[in-house]
Image (cartoon, rainbow, N blue to C red):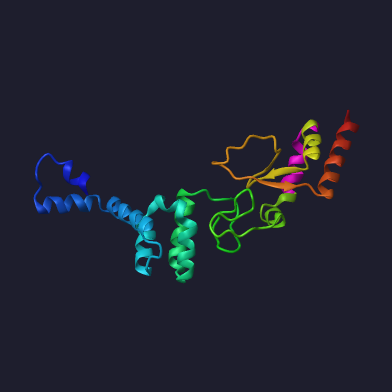
């Protein structure tokens, strides 16, 4: 508000000031929402609605708390708004949490929003590990196949499987460590055997 007034080189008339405030209404509401979030521990339903409606990207670090508040108030509408904000400004994961519905399963298999822990089997199933692993084994070098057998795991993402040696920019894409089962190792050994016969 101070910025809006002092940015003028003259003392504005009331109607001019109101117009200027209205032009910056969204920013003003966002500032108010953030201040409310910081100062109010247990907001009322109306206060929470205002915070979620106008907090915008500033809410991302507080989404777990806001989700709990909205859940306790049975406000599915606010939860949907929070999901939309997470998709737009957060770090959406390739799969959604079966408990809260947010795409917020981090590489440690814990949901950033609700704290739910999913199993490696869940990750394998939702991201079609078998098909992606088969493709990876066919295209990886013998050295790489031998390396992942020694390491005992690979990285599974939305699009493909990668070696743990692959440098991933975590802020761009999320990959999950998936431990190799006996059947996975046998598949690697079979592929390596085929290639050695070809030489």
Farthest right residue in view = 197
Kindly report the secondary structure that dominates the magenta region of the rendered protein: helix
Quadrant the C terminus occupies: top right
The residue positioned 86% from the left and 45% from the top of the image is 186
> x%, y% of residue 85?
44, 54
Percent coordinates x, y for residue 11 in the rendering: 9, 45
Q: Quadrant for residue 15, please give it.
A: bottom left
Whether residue 64 is situated above or below residue 185 in the rendered picture? below
Above or below: residue 45 compared with residue 170 = below
- Residue 137 inside the magenta-drawn segment: yes
Q: Nearer the viewer, residue 68 or 174?
A: 68
Task: Report the front residue among 188 and 139.
Answer: 188
Given the current orientation, which residue lies at the most extreme bottom position? 74
Q: Which residues are magenta?
A: 131-142
Query: Position of 112 compared to 3: left or right?
Result: right
Q: Position of residue 53 (x, y in %)?
A: 36, 59
Closer to us: 67 or 199: 67
Figure disc tally: 0
Front-most of residues 121 and 68: 68
Q: Residue at horizontal 8%, vertical 50%? A: 13
* 157 on left or right of 195: left
Q: Residue at x 43, y 60 (%)?
A: 81
Tell me the quarter of the picture where residue 170 sits: top right
Identified at 64% across, 46% down, the residue is: 157
Q: Is residue 148 above or below residue 97?
A: above
Residue 142 locus on image (x, y percent):
81, 32
Q: Find out whether residue 194 is within the magenta segment.
A: no
């Amino acid at each position: 508000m101070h910025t809006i007034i002092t940015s003028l080189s003259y003392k504005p008339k009331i109607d001019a000031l109101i117009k200027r405030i209205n032009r910056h209404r969204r920013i003003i509401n966002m500032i108010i929402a953030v201040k409310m979030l910081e100062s109010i521990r247990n907001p009322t339903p109306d206060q929470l609605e205002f915070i979620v409606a106008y907090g915008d990207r500033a809410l991302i670090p507080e989404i777990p708390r806001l989700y709990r508040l909205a859940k306790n108030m049975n406000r599915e509408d606010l939860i949907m708004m929070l999901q939309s904000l997470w998709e737009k400004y957060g770090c959406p994961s390739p799969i959604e949490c079966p408990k809260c519905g947010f795409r917020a399963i981090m590489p440690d298999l814990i949901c950033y929003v609700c704290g739910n822990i999913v199993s490696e089997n869940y990750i394998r199933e939702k991201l079609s590990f078998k098909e992606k692993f088969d493709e990876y084994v066919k295209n990886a070098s013998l050295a790489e196949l031998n390396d992942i057998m020694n390491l005992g795991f690979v990285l599974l993402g939305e699009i493909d499987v990668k070696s743990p040696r692959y440098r991933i920019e975590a802020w761009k894409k999320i990959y999950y460590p998936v431990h190799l089962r006996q059947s996975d190792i046998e598949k690697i050994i079979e592929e390596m055997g085929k290639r050695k016969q070809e030489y």
